[in-house]
Every structure is written in C-alpha cells, then in structure tokens.
Image (cartoon, coloured by chain):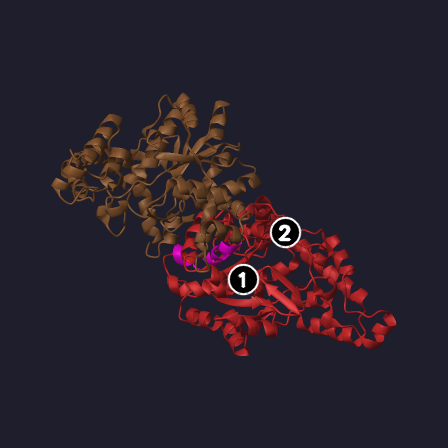
Chain colours: A brown, B red
Amino acid sequence: MSNSQDFTVTPWEVKGEVDYDKLVREFGTQLLTEELLGRIKKHTGDIHLFLRRKIFFSHRDLDWILDRYEAGEKFFLYTGRGPSGHTHVGHLVPWIFTRHLQEKFGAELYFQMTDDEKFLHDEKMSLKESMGYTYENALDVIACGFEPGKTFIFSDVEYGKTLYKMAVEIAKHITYSTAKAVFGFEDSTNVGMIFFPCIQAVPCFLPSILKSKNMPCLIPAAIDQDPYWRGIARFVAPKLGFYKPAQIHSKFMPGLARGGKMSASDPKSAIFTVDPPEMAEEKVMSSYTGGRATVAEQRRLGGQAEICPVYHYYHFLFEEDEKELAKIYHDCKSGALLCGDCKANLAGKVRRFLTEHQRKRESARKKLDKFIIRD
Amino acid sequence: MSNSQDFTVTPWEVKGEVDYDKLVREFGTQLLTEELLGRIKKHTGDIHLFLRRKIFFSHRDLDWILDRYEAGEKFFLYTGRGPSGHTHVGHLVPWIFTRHLQEKFGAELYFQMTDDEKFLHDEKMSLKESMGYTYENALDVIACGFEPGKTFIFSDVEYGKTLYKMAVEIAKHITYSTAKAVFGFEDSTNVGMIFFPCIQAVPCFLPSILKSKNMPCLIPAAIDQDPYWRGIARFVAPKLGFYKPAQIHSKFMPGLARGGKMSASDPKSAIFTVDPPEMAEEKVMSSYTGGRATVAEQRRLGGQAEICPVYHYYHFLFEEDEKELAKIYHDCKSGALLCGDCKANLAGKVRRFLTEHQRKRESARKKLDKFIIRD
C-alpha cells in the first residue's frame, strides 16, 4: 500500500499522479531490466508491445520463474478481476498480456473473480450484483482469446468449497496484526474483508494442490494488487511448503477525464466493452486532452502529449506501430496535429476495436461452460 | 464470555466452578421458569429429565418460539459440535435433548460440525484430523436416534460453498470491533478465527434461505456457545430480514477428576463413546469422589454428593428414576452408601450404556449418507 501526499495506490483505490519509480521503491519490487527482457525474448521470439513500452514494468522473482522454466519446470498463470461493474478497456491490458504469456509459454491460467470482495467492500453492492458481473466480465476475458482446457475462470462464491478449505489453511498463519499492517485494516473494517486476503491467496497454490505437485506461479496484474501477494501469499508459501508466487506488474491505463482519472461516477471517463461503438466514439471525442486553449496557441506551442489521455490510449492499446506512435507524439508536440483530428483518429480505432471485441464477446457466451470451474 | 476470578466460560474454554446464576446475569439470558416448563409440557406430554433436573436451565426467546409454534409456525433445530476429538458422554447431553425436541415438535435438525474452527483454534491440529473427527462424531449423533430425512449433518469444510456464500452476507455487517468485543480477539488472533463466527451463524438462517421462507430457529446447546448467537446471529438477523434464533442452554457435565474437570491431557477424566466398556468401568472405579478419608469417617459424616463426579454422572445421564437418584443421594449423605459400591453400580450402568451406544454407533456407519449433506 502506498499512501503518499501525491498519490494513493491500494488494492481498492488508485488516485493521483502515480510515481511508479517511487512505488517500486516503496513496495520493494524490481524494475524489469533489459537483461531480463532479453531472457524473455529467447522464449517468446519477440518482445511484447507492453514490455517494450514499459506498461508491464516491474516484477518479483521473474528471473526465478525463467530459471525454473529453462530447467524444464512449467509454471502456471494466475490473475483475476474484482467484478464491481462492466469491464473497461483498461482492464483488458493485463488480460491481453496474460493471453500472450499463455500462448508463448504453454501455461495454464487460473482466473479469479473476486465477487465476494467486491460485495464486502462496496456498501451498496449486493452479492447477486457482483456475481452477475462475474459472468459478464468472464465474457471479456474469454474474448481475449484464452485457450479452453487450459483456462479456468471461477467465481469466489461459486468455487467457495474449494477456496474456503484452502483459505483456512492460509488463515491459520495470518494474525490480525499481520493483516492490519499489510492492508491498513481498522476497527470498523468488516470481518469478511479481514479474511478475504486468504481467499485471494488460494489460487497461488491451487494447481499445486489439485495436481499434488509443487508448481511455480506467475501473476500478471496491475501493481496495486501487490500487497495481496507480498503480504499474504509470499509470506505463507514457505510455511505451507509451496513456492512463493512470482509477479509481473503493469501500470494503470488512464481514463479520459482531466488528470487521467477514471471515475465510476463519471461513465464518460472510461470506455466500457459493452458501450455501443458510437457511444465510445463520442466519449473519445469529448475526452480531456493535452491541447491548448486555442488553435493558434496549439500551432505555436504544440500539444502536451505527456498529460493527454488520448495519447495514452494510443500508447497503451490503440496504436501498435512504434513509428506511427512516434509520429503522433511528434506531430502533437510540433503543433502539426490538432486535438480534433487526433481524437477522430482514435475514435475510429476504438470503434473498430470494440466492434471486433463485442463480436468475440458475444460468441464467448456459448463457450462459458468450457472455461468456468465451480464446486 | 464470562471470565471472572472463580471461573471462565468462553466458546473455547470452560474452567473453574461455574456459578450458573452469575453466568445467566452476565450473559443476559433468562432462567427457565415453571410457567415456561408448563407450556412445554402441553406439547411434549411430559417434562424431560434434563428440564426437570435443570440440566437445561436457561434460554433466550423460548416463549417466542412457543408462540410461533402455537400459531402453527414450525421451527427448526440447530446445534453442533467442534470435532476436536472423540465424543465423550457429556457431549451426548444436548444431543439427547435435541433428539427429544425433534420427536415432540416434529422439527428438522441442522447439525454443524465446525472442523474449520477446531483446526483454526488448535495449533497442533491438522485440517485432515478435524475433518476425520467430523465423521467419527457424526456416528455418535446418529446413534442418538435422530430421524433420517429430517436431520442434516454437515462439515463446515465439506459444505463450504453454501456456508461461505451466506457467511459473507453476515460478515458485511460485523466490524472487527464488534467481533473483538464479543469474543475478546487480540492482534495475535488469526484471521480465520476472526471470520469464523460468521460461518457459525449461517445455520440459524440456512433453512430460511433453502426454503425461501423465514423460519424460527431454536438452538439447544451448552451455554458457553451463547456469544456466537448473541453477538453475531441475533445481532445480524434483523439486518438480513431473518428471525433472531432462540436458544435453550445446558450446563456442563463434569468430568471424573478432582473438581469435576474433564481434561484433554487426562483421558481418564472423561468417558469417551469409543472407550471399550471395560476401560470405561475402570475409569469410573478410579474416579475422584466426594468420599471421606476412611470408611469409619464416611459412616460417621456421610459422603459429599454435591461435589462428587460419580453422583453428577447419575444425575446427568445414568439414573433416570427420580426415586432411585434421591435414594443414592440420601444413602451417600447418611453414610450408608460407600464410594466403592456406588462406583461399582455406576460402572455397570456405564458399561451397559456404552455397549448399547456402540451397537447403535456401528450401525450408524452405513446410514451416514442419509444424514450428511455437502456441496
């Protein structure tokens, strides 16, 4: 948990301008080095866009996972989603990367939907609601192209027998003071939230239990989830005789509002995968940008790509070509590219992306049974 | 929880000479009145031994349960067992009474085996071990004569999907400070124990959920379990739209050691249902008693039945006839009955009881499937 003056990053809240270098120091993770990227490239053939652009930028024990892999020991992937609402395009970033890892390393994926957590955390949310989003969000996961038979998606509630049994084994080693130190729990925290980190730790060890064989685990996830693994799963692993899970961390994709915020109370600040493509186009067209007050000023001073959500959308997800991305940046900074044109270009890309994603998402409905595991 | 200078009663520990009147005042329960016993008798035809002898002595809302019943609304029974070891004869007291209530009121019984709690609470116990005792203890429950089809026994771990789902609904309303106040949790308490009271509260509402209809619940149990229902289930019931569970409380059957203690470290202090009958006879014969130092002294002063575990064994379970019990008491106090003869008489009764119980217990093995529910 980081809670400095300028920004906050906890598993439940990310706000302010995140200083990722500071976060890495505070969390005690490692930056991805060129050497490590070189080792990955040996197995993947190329360096994924998200690594090249440092969208995935930090890790724990990734070198160890590669050691194990090179010694012939397969790892599995574990990531998840807190189903508090519809999926937005920012959520897809770690999933697309996870899909890439699955393909290149032939890895199984355990995908956890923490409908219990979202219900426990949000005063206004019913359990029925968060469980409903589990299945809505699962369609987006499947639409990312994961392999059936190697991909296991589960609702915490619907897989509760398996998870609770393992969670009590973990919980026996976690005192309240440990949990409080990691998550900042208070006297007013409900006891469900206090136990929940043990449920979230289970999938790190689940395949090892199911297959009665210790298996290395790699977790690709946004860095805000790090406290779960650092404070619980990695702490308890040696006590239970399991490997500590390794991690690879992504940055947060900004929203379309001022300051790069995505706000639940402002649905215009994020593009949801269920948005009609025309609505998404409109959201892009009315996005905050790094542009100047007038055209004349922009021609003279150039735009501010660094603080522009539109530019960040290209950077994260909507312009894969490095040369094209560099051209957008250059033309923005030089004043040659005005925000209206830049947004119109992005809007078209977003529309095409969504149309295609929604086609896959719909076809995922009939495949759900191939992916969902439950008790 | 009561933790005075003279005695301690918590859900996990009972020690010292329990002052039941004080406990009732501290817990805020009601003593069973003659009037209430009269109302019960209208439905049961006679007054059960355990009520007559005030072994069941206290309650919450029993009058309300009878109101509902007399208005045509059936209640269900809920009790349970922490499977930390083999069943001893003291455990049978509330079960025998629960069986009586089932028969007289035609009530369904939900019987919870808290194998999660016993694992979480006892540092040395494995989950496999406590789950093993779940099934061993279930044989003793069934041997008490419960009705198949109306009796549902479950392991918390094996019924974890159903229980966890409902427990998070409860947990959302229980803050850490509430749980701490009820159970005396400390920073060193593990987070599994902190969440567990929500699992123990679930059966109070389970039939109401399973049948989609609010059903009154009556819990017959030893009074040490009261904090679970008072602090959690009764607190949360109105928030979730359920009836508060009613309770009827028993005293603790003493052990055979000095001061009426049953001690896990001294297996001679309790008679287990799996003890070979000859071993049980020996335990009775070497019991502590309220006898005097010499025969001459006993003839002169009489024995001390009040503090004698042997007398308490007759009182609780092994002498149903009031006249016979009164005769034992009188002959002890007058010095006519010496401890050796008194113990030999009890030993014979215990042997016959155990032989019969063990026969029923063995025949329960093939009936387990008719009683156990799991996810």
Residue on which the image places disc 1: B183
Task: Check disc 2 and give the amino acid type.
Answer: Gly
* Residue for badge 2: B85
Quadrant placement of the C terminus of chain A? top left
Distance between mark 1 and mark 2 Cα atoms = 23 Å
Q: Would residue A92 appear left or right of A79 to someone viewing this image? A: left
Indicate the quadrant where residue B327 lies: bottom right
In the rendered image, residue B253, in percent from the top left (x then y), is placed at 65, 64
Residue A13 location, x and y as percent?
36, 49
The chain under label 1 reads B
Density class for disc 2 (Cα within 10 Å; few <14, some 14-19, many ≥20) is some
Query: Which amino acid, mark 1?
Result: Phe
| Residue A100 position (above or below residue A237) | above
Residue A243 vs B299, above or below: the answer is above
User: Is B314 covered by the magenta stretch?
Assistant: no
Q: Give the mark nearest the N terminus, 1 or 2.
A: 2
Tell us which disc is closer to us: 1 or 2: 1
